[in-house]
Amino acid sequence: MSETDADKLKDMSEEEKAMMAEWEATAGEGASSGGEAMPAFDGDVDNSGARILNQEEIDSLLGFDDAGSYSGEKSGVMALINSAMVNYERLPMLDIVFDRLVRLMSTSLRNLTSDNVEVSLDQVSTVRFGDYMNSIPLPAMLSVFKAEEWDNNGLLVTDSALIYSIVDVLLGGRKGTPAIRVEGRPYTTIETKLVEKMVEVTLSDLSSAFDPLSPVGFNLDRMETNPRFATISQSGSACVLARLRVDMGDRGGRVEVLIPYATLEPVRELLLQMFMGEKFGRDSIWESHLTHELHKTDVQLQAVLGEVTIPLGEMLAWKPGSRVMFPTRTSDELELRCGYFPMFKGPVGQKQGNIAVRIEMYIPPEKEEDE
């Protein structure tokens, strides 16, 4: 024990010394009995008593394994970052739009292929653009289309199985036999043109699916086979992904429609509706009833024959028989008011022994100036 500690012990009272001796005895009993007085950990403790993580724990949290390589997909930090995409804004009306697309595509592809085609909707989800582009199984055909009225782009991806199935069907392949795939070579011009025909039919159906909500035209811009050349948005942009399954007997494949949220922004309010034709804060029945009743309301109009400003002292000197001279002439137009608001103007005359005013001009209300 140092001299400083000895001086501190001298200054301590008898009660404090007894309490300190009791703590030392309790700690000694815990150590001799093999009990755990405090949980052991490798990290240090700062002055405030908070635990300081060691390097191994920091690497594990950030996603580095024992060998020092990064595995961020399983780390807690990356899970928190990626979870934000799951809770992105829900657009209920999109489900109805894609259901209409499924029905329209089934009919259109049957007319195109003269075969029994069944189209089904597998999933409508939200993804990041960069993550989706990295997950596309190649080879595939990526069709970039533009929404003319919304002034933005979207993406339609046709997988290899559907490409060869469409080519086989349109070129007269036998029913009941799967399409023959020839991997490891680029798509020929004939194959590209046949797929382009199917893509144009699909985009036309997609336009028709959006028509009850908001008229829009989707036009094919270009077709790519390399995802790097089909970039239409930033890597971290949120997108709506609809996965469609196309079955033609034993043949078929997938079509995926990717629309960024930025493309859907002009019709965002419409897509937030729970059902078609929903009105936010409006009741059309009550609105029409109120309009009908307002048209039957009686309104009192006052014709102002003349106005003059008189001093208060002169008005107090009035007596029975006093005359007030107005500057109005018989050729002047009178003003008709509803309360204090001027409504109409017209010349004055006489009809059936009564003074009458013929309405010839409407006086628009004055706009209130912004404060």
Image: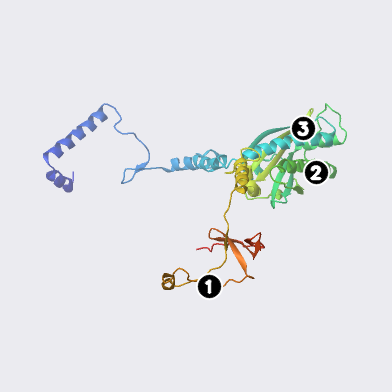
Q: Looking at the picture, which amino acid does disc 1 mark?
A: Met
Of the numbered discs in the image, which one, if any, rests on residue 196?
Answer: 2
Q: Is residue 282 left or right of residue 43?
A: right
Gap between marks 1 and 3 measured at Cα: 96 Å
Gap between marks 2 and 3 measured at Cα: 16 Å
Labels 1 and 3: the sequence-earlier one: 3
Residue 254 location in percent, x, y?
A: 73, 35
Q: Is residue 322 left or right of residue 327?
A: left
Quadrant for the N terminus in the image = top left
The residue sitting at 25% across, 28% down in the picture is: 32
Gap between marks 1 and 2 measured at Cα: 88 Å
Residue 87 location in percent, x, y?
A: 55, 40
The answer to which quarter of the image holds residue 56 is top left
Closest to the camera, between mark 1 and mark 3, is 1
SS at badge 1: loop
Closest to the camera, between mark 1 and mark 2, is 1
Residue 120 location in percent, x, y?
A: 72, 32
Is residue 15 positioned above or below 268 on the image? above
Name the residue carrying label 1: 325
The answer to which quarter of the image holds residue 31 is top left
**Residue 71 visible:** no
Is residue 90 positioned above or below 234 on the image? above
**Residue 132 visible:** yes
Q: Is residue 358 left or right of residue 9?
A: right
Q: Looking at the picture, which amino acid does disc 2 mark?
A: Glu
Name the residue carrying label 3: 252
